[in-house]
């Protein structure tokens, strides 16, 4: 799994310099916080701290209502959400006050995968700008939020400096932009504790601890990232639905491939998992072998779709690893190796590479599209077969899906078909497309479930630590 991340010794590069930062010490009104110098830029943030009037109280939280600020930094997305939840007869009703996801994927693309030191640095630089966007967005919905201004004491500042001794950028940004901000309307901070990349997780955790110094009334609660992926499937029309249990869930991401059995809220039994690479990892490695950019999932998906539409056949037959084993485990590293051999065995002439008429794919591109199609079909065959087995064995009444790989339209269709085959009465829960990849909303939703359904499972501690291989 560690292989999934870029080893700087192997790539021999160094972190590219960060160019655009326009933070000026002591300046209260910040314009053009150009957080993103590569890829999917955040719109410029224009925020006027002086508009915050002192003295008007923020809305008080009603007894069963919880306002949750969530922070996600486990991999290459810096994300923060603010939601308000309350329990209803059908589930948990959620008002999304703000949700910002800032992806670093383009920065990592040149390394062909996530480069940990770069991810850590970028989270440090992006967290406060993303937080300012969350503040601005939630104020648009609810004017009373973040209205009160506070004056942080020297002591508070020193405490924050101590918490952030390893994150100097973050400290600098907090001092410049958040010291006057009151978190009065917020009840809880949900912070991703793991699984994920530890240096990246630590930045988010330290940020949460720094906010706790600033806002002592707020509780900071660790959340499992995979629980977030799972709960995001149940989120429909602003409600976290209560599924009929037992429920079987397939989680497929860059670091995980797991089948989870649940008899009730908060009870997770992992009944199947990958023995080597995760599905997303196999997508990313296959994309790299085909010379496609990171992240590989969308690229492979696009090529495979083209092959299906244009009826380009598969040039080779790839294995379906462990498809017939009696357990519910997976293995995807053999698939990547088979792609490696197929790529090695295929040499294209310069003419073929250069291509023919514009409306035709080159021979090489056709070959790649056919291979992408075969790869996606191999993955679908294995996932659907094991899921079917899990559903039948568990007598599941509901089936949920989660993780970045669920962005694949093809896999969504194939998996849904298979669930229907396993039982027409099984309810299917799929995450909305924008909640398949990593995001902070799912972290807030996961905490919402715990707060309202299983508060006894909540562990609150003053010092949370990152756990890279945290289990559900
Ligand atoms: O859940 P996620 O965003 O991050 C982790 O927690 O790992 O998953 C990222 C993975 C990457 O491997 C990426 O290639 C894959 O999700 N992915 C896809 C698609 N979009 C992203 N895989 C298949 N098809 C897609 N459309
Ligand atoms: Zn994830």
Image (cartoon, rainbow, N blue to C red):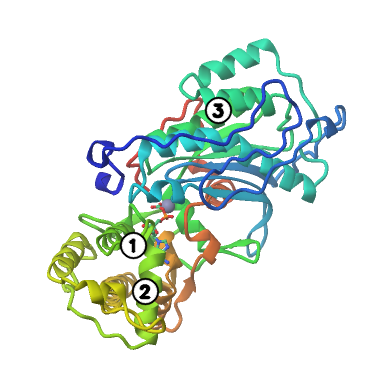
Q: Real-space Cα distance between discs 3 and 2?
A: 40 Å
How many callouts does the rendering have? 3
- Which percent across, then down, holds residue 397? 43, 73
**Disc 1 versus disc 3: nearer the observer:** 1
Disc on the earlier residue, 1 or 2: 1
Badge 1 is on which residue? Answer: 292
The answer to whether one can see residue 24 in this image is yes
| 415 relative to 86, above or below | below
Identify which residue is drawn at 75% across, 27% down.
28
Residue 365 is drawn in which quadrant?
Answer: bottom left
Badge 2 is on which residue? Answer: 303
Badge 3 is on which residue? Answer: 170
Q: Real-space Cα distance between discs 1 and 3?
A: 34 Å
The answer to whether one can see residue 422 in this image is no
Give the secondary structure at mark 3. Answer: helix
Disc on the earlier residue, 3 or 2: 3
- Which percent across, then down, holds residue 400? 44, 67
Disc on the earlier residue, 1 or 3: 3
Give the secondary structure at mark 1. Answer: loop
- Which percent across, then down, holds residue 87? 66, 55
Residue 221 as seen in the image, left or right of residue 408? right
| Disc 1 residue lies near ligand 1 with CB under 8 A | no
Residue 182 as seen in the image, left or right of residue 71? right
Residues marked 1 and 2 touching at CB (< 8 Å)? yes
Identify which residue is drawn at 39% across, 86% down.
309
């Amino acid at each position: 799994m560690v292989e999934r991340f870029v080893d700087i010794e192997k790539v021999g590069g160094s972190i590219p310099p960060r160019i655009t930062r326009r933070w000026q010490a002591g300046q209260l009104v910040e314009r053009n916080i150009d957080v993103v110098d590569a890829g999917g830029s955040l719109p410029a943030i224009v925020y006027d701290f002086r508009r915050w009037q002192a003295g008007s109280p923020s809305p008080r939280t009603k007894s069963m209502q919880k306002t949750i600020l969530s922070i996600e930094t486990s991999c290459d997305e810096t994300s923060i959400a603010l939601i308000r939840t309350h329990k209803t007869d059908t589930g948990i009703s959620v008002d999304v006050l703000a949700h910002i996801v800032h992806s670093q994927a383009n920065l990592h693309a040149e390394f062909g995968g996530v480069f940990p030191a770069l991810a850590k640095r970028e989270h440090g630089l992006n967290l406060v700008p993303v937080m300012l966007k969350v503040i601005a967005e939630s104020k648009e919905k609810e004017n009373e939020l973040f209205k009160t201004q506070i004056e942080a004491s020297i002591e508070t500042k020193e405490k924050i400096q101590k918490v952030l001794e390893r994150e100097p950028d973050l400290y600098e940004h907090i001092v410049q932009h958040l010291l006057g901000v009151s978190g009065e309307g917020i009840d809880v901070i949900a912070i991703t504790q793991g699984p994920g990349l530890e240096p990246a997780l630590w930045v988010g955790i330290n940020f949460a601890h720094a906010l706790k110094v600033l806002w002592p009334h707020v509780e900071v609660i660790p959340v499992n990232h995979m629980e977030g992926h799972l709960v995001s499937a149940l989120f429909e029309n602003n409600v976290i639905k209560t599924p009929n249990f037992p429920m079987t869930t397939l989680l497929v991401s860059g670091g995980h491939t797991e089948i989870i059995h649940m008899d009730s809220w908060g009870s997770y039994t992992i009944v199947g998992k990958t023995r080597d690479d995760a599905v997303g990892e196999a997508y990313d490695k296959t994309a790299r072998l085909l010379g496609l950019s990171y992240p590989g999932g969308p690229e492979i998906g696009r090529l495979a779709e083209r092959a299906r539409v244009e009826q380009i056949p598969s040039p080779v037959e790839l294995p379906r690893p462990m498809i017939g084993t009696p357990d519910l485990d997976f293995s995807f590293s053999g698939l990547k190796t088979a792609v490696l051999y197929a790529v090695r065995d295929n040499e294209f002439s310069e003419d073929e590479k250069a291509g023919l008429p514009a409306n035709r794919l080159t021979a090489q591109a056709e070959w790649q599209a056919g291979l992408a199609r075969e790869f996606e079909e191999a993955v679908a065959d294995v996932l659907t077969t094991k899921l079917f087995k899990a559903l039948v064995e568990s007598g599941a009444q509901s089936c949920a899906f989660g993780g970045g790989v669920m962005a694949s339209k093809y896999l969504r269709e194939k998996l849904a078909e298979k669930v229907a085959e396993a039982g027409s009465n099984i309810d299917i829960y799929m995450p909305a497309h924008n909640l398949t990849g990593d995001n902070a909303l799912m972290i807030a939703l996961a905490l919402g479930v715990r707060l309202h359904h299983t508060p006894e499972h909540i562990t609150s501690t003053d010092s949370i630590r990152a756990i890279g291989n945290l289990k559900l």
